[in-house]
Amino acid sequence: MSRKAALRAELAASGDRSIIVQGVVPPREVLLEFIADNPDRATKREIAKAFGLKGDTRVELKDVLRDLEDEGLLQKSRKALTRPGALPPMTVLDITSRGKDGELIARPAEWLDDQGVAPAVLIRQSSDNRSKAKTPTAGLGDRVLAKIFPNKDRKGPAYTARVVKIIDKHRNAALGVIRMMPEGGARLLPIDRRGEEMQIALSDLGEAKDGDLIEADVLRGNRFGLTRAKVLTVVGSVASEKAISMIAIYSHGIPHIFPKPVMDEAEEARPASMAKREDWRHVPLVTIDPADAKDHDDAVYAEPDPSPDNPDGVIVTVAIADVSWYVRTGAPLDREALKRGNSVYFPDRVVPMLPERISNNLCSLREGEDRPALAVRMVFSKDGRKASHTFHRIMMKSAAKLSYQQAQAAIDGKPDDKTGPLLEPILKPLWHAYAVMKRGRDRRQPLELDMPERKILLKSDGTVDKVIIPERLDAHKLIEEMMIQANVCAAETLEKKRQPLIYRVHDAPSLAKQEVLREFLATLGISMAKGGQMRANSFNGILARAEDTPHQVMVNEMVLRSQSQAVYSPENIGHFGLNLMKYAHFTSPIRRYADLIVHRALVGSLGLGEGGITPEEEAQLDDIAAEISTFERRAMAAERDTINRLIAHHLAERVGQEFEGRVSGVTKAGLFVTLPTYGADGFVPISTIGNDYFHYDESRQALIGDKTGLGYQLGDAVDVRLAEAIPLAGALRFEMLSEGQKMGAATRSFHKSGRRAARKPGTRPPRRGR
């Protein structure tokens, strides 16, 4: 027996897991504890270094870590390993309360319901005078960017944190609607499903009236009875137009009013000069956007490549508004743009990242007007492979402003007065270039999920008119592919220049999520290969096998759920969904701060003049990436909440009516059902389903009756009755009308945790969500 094998055997026999022998792979429990305690060192290389592992022992370590991933005890996050549900080393936190000794307690700003209870984080208060000068002083209600550390003494909150930056001050306010009470005083009705009702004295009402949406300061609670609150701001009447989106704006803390210094800087901005710019005003670039678009940040042009070395090749030019010329690092415009992170799109309004004078005027590529831009000129061979590309800082003049439908109609043989003269010289070459680029896309095989997006159309009073699924046109796909390739070029150029940047990264699905998907697919008779080297086209094969079957919707849904979330990062791990190794957002600097960073990096590294990235900004890319990733999730949550509230308002007068739906989620507590006509989700509590005991079968994503074997599975078409609608919370509750399908016995391993008693016959279902 070798010395290392003997040490390993001795270590295992001793049962003392605290003993660590350098050069020997430690026990699994020690590895898990090290990863939990050292999130900033949780890469395979750092773990091997910490335990002195070399050669064969490093291979053994990889095998152990892979086993831990397969068992769901670890998950891969970017290049590091983390415990499932663990916080990343840099996290945005909301300081929500104080501990028993007065210390500040925070929780993650964004935390999904299906992740369980958000972990508590103790904010460190340094006693070092030198540290005090560098660490921002945070307080109750603040939103902060913080460095996260596991709490090693295992007492109190699971984590401690050091504040790096205060993002937003004094967020300790509640949002709700005033209801005047007949007996005097007022109540604050929460707009959040998990919020609490509060009482407001008449002296604390200010100018608020019955039905007003207000922001309130939460006062010290009474020992008995409701918590007290005081009106801070009257947002407006909930009956007014656009009130629904204002609820989301306030509840998610989205900055929506530009400070005066920001507006002043925007108004003082003047058109860009020709300094260090190429004059491309003769190039007939065109914008193709939604018909109702107000800003235009990208324009395209294509032509055959005249080079004899590239027969049947094409040249594609993408020009992007030069926002970096107007928004300089550290200026008021820049600080406000970073605070917002991105524009937020609601059915009734847009909360822009930049003031209108910048976004809709000076940086909008308006038809027939001179505008500064950064352009990339890409050369493709006839098989769709990119041969070369170059970046240019230019002055351009858009030849035409077109909508997707307008451009598509012209190609389909129905040109109008505007597109008729553009058809041969501009539109047909664009479509030909897209056909060439599509060959490369088809060879690359990005993930192709079939998840149609719904769009809510509103009436003039801000209420829902109808919900539609816009047609997916080749015009959409053409612009999308040209933007993707421009983003690839940006990442490749900056890497070649060794220029720090922010990538758009998308990690491969974790092994734990792959295993959940594999078990689910097995119940449908669809096989899925094991192993951690899944590629996007592997999932496309699964989707193809489900196409045109009753399981198509649920398979698409489960594949989507298995995917990781795309984020921004200064470290590149590639983009799994697009099947690209180098990818950075470059094409929308008017509405995304990440793109503005990439523009600055290109200007600086290529020597294209003023507005380049600064050394100070480069040093903050980790923090910036963490912030804008959080702000992106904030925007998505606000948009989703607004749609839910609009639909709940729309259906509030239809309680008792029956609807056709589809099971979109299965939990131990019940079923989520989506109404395809409206794109709205509602909940069916498990206690209201039939007269049986139901068990949650995770592998099948189903609830199965104990006695009958009848059940409901993800993707099932069902009939439901609307039992309750709570517009302010955006909540719908349904009663199940459809009988379950025969499914056989539930998987026994899920019986204990999934069992719920059904209601007795003749009893009313409980009222939820108030």
Image: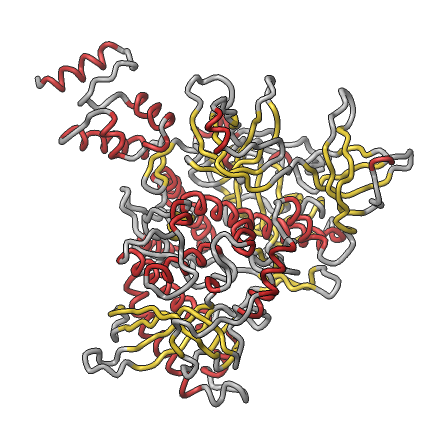
In front here: 564 or 160? 160
In front here: 353 or 646? 353
Q: Name the residue at the right extreme.
A: 183
Task: Classify 584 as above or below 16.
Answer: below
Q: Name the residue at the top extreme.
A: 14
Query: Residue at the location (13% across, 31% down)?
Result: 55
Which picture quadrant has residue 308? Answer: bottom left
Which picture quadrant has residue 513? Answer: top left
Q: In the picture provided, is 56 more to the left or to the right than 221?
A: left
Which picture quadrant has residue 224? Answer: top right
Q: Can residue 601 be seen in this view?
A: yes
In percent of width and height, residue 56 lies at 14, 30
Task: Classify 177 as above or below 751.
Answer: below
Query: Residue at the location (29% across, 35% down)?
Result: 43
Q: In the picture provided, is 232 more to the left or to the right than 639?
A: right
Q: Quadrant of the N terminus?
A: top left
In percent of width and height, residue 489 lies at 32, 63
In percent of width and height, residue 764 lies at 73, 35
Q: In the picture provided, is 741 more to the left or to the right than 738?
A: left
Q: Quadrant of the C terminus?
A: top right
Q: Is residue 706 visible?
A: no
Query: Residue at the location (54% across, 89% down)?
Result: 417
Q: How many marks?
A: 0
In percent of width and height, residue 295 lies at 55, 68
Task: Classify 522 as above or below 761.
Answer: below
Q: Which colour scheme is used?
A: secondary structure
